[in-house]
Amino acid sequence: MTNLVDRPTRTAAELSAEELRAGAGALAGLVERYRPRVLAVLGITAWRLGFERPRAVAGLQPERVGGAATWVVPNPSGLNAHHQLPDLARIYGQLRDAALAG
């Protein structure tokens, strides 16, 4: 599970589309190198901008990154009011089940 940009911010709005796209490229290279079965990207907005998928929704993605099954999960930050605890529990539970099913 990872973020696309390796620097702290208060909100995702502080990250530029260029940073997110560069992070997406670097992440794809890391996944190809280390070959995890499952990749989880934290933050739907980061995914949409970084991988240029403006209509993506949280959950399992139709495309793979670096060969790994790819999930996008909502950021659980208290600043993210779009997803409440039941939604987070459901999505993270689905991710856990998929990762364990291997």
Image: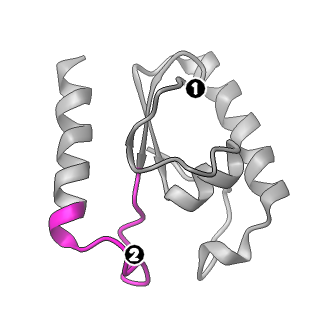
Whole-percent x and y of residue 34? 55, 19
Instruction: Tell me the residue at 40%/19% (across/down).
Output: 37
Residue 31 relative to residue 92: left or right: right
In this picture, residue 43 sits left or right of residue 60: right
Residue type for callout 2: Ser
Specify whether residue 7 is in view. yes
**Does 86 lie within the magenta span?**
yes
Q: Residue at x 73, y 54 (%)?
A: 20
Task: Report if residue 90 lies within the magenta region.
Answer: no
Overall secondary structure of the magenta stretch?
loop
Please, is residue 97 above or below residue 3 in the view? Answer: above
Quickly name the residue at label 1. Answer: 65
Quadrant housing the C terminus: top left
Q: Tag 1 or tag 2, which sits nearer the N-term?
A: 1
Q: Give how far apart the Cα atoms at labels 2 and 1 are.
A: 24 Å
Picture disc at residue 77:
2
Query: Which residue type does callout 1 highlight?
Result: Val
- For image coordinates 37% across by 75% down, the residue present is 82
| Label at residue 94 | none
In the displayed structure, 31 sits above or below 19; it is: above
Start-end of magenta stretch: 73-87
Residue 73, position in %: x, y? 39, 52
Residue at the (68%, 42%) spot, across then down = 51
Give the position of the N terminus as an image quadrant.
top left
Secondary structure beneath disc 2?
A: loop
Give the image quarter of residue 39: top left
- The picture quadrant where one finds residue 80 is bottom left
State the residue in front, 88 or 26.
Answer: 88
Vertical relation: 53 (above or below) 88: above
